[in-house]
Image (tube, grey):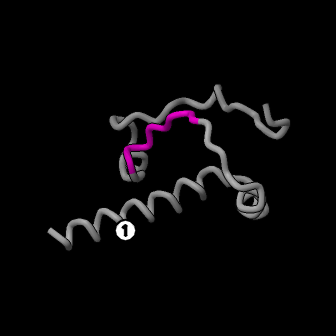
Amino acid sequence: MNKEYEPDWNQPAVRPHDTVAQKHHAGGGVKQIVTIRLDVDMLEWFKSAGPGYQTRINQVLRAHMDAQRAAAQQQQ
């Protein structure tokens, strides 16, 4: 396992029925732990911006997903 990895088991899962601010989090706020292989230079770039790199990666992936969905909707 990566030496930099620190699991955040102590953080409570965010559920859709939680506070209003959490409800507005895209995707309902429920997270799933996954393993993904990324290019080293790309991961280092995300990490270089400081803590929260996993959230930033998620935001980029969500923006791409939303753009793909919008494009698919326009084609229909």
Q: Residue at x 77, y 37 (%)?
A: 5
- Where does the image place residue 68, in percent across and percent down from the top left? 35, 65
Q: Residue at x 63, y 50 (%)?
A: 54
Local secondary structure at mark 1 = helix
* 28 on left or right of 8: left
Q: Quadrant of residue 74 in the image? A: bottom left
Q: In the rendered image, which residue does mark 1 sit on? A: 67
Q: Quadrant of residue 42 in the image? A: bottom right
Q: Quadrant of residue 18 in the image? A: top left
Q: Amino acid at mark 1?
A: Ala
The number of discs equals: 1
Q: Residue at x 42, y 46 (%)?
A: 22
- Where does the image place residue 47, in percent across and percent down from the top left? 75, 57
Q: Quadrant of the N terminus?
A: top right
Q: Residue at x 38, y 44 (%)?
A: 28
Q: Quadrant of the C terminus?
A: bottom left
Find out whether residue 64 is within the magenta segment.
Answer: no
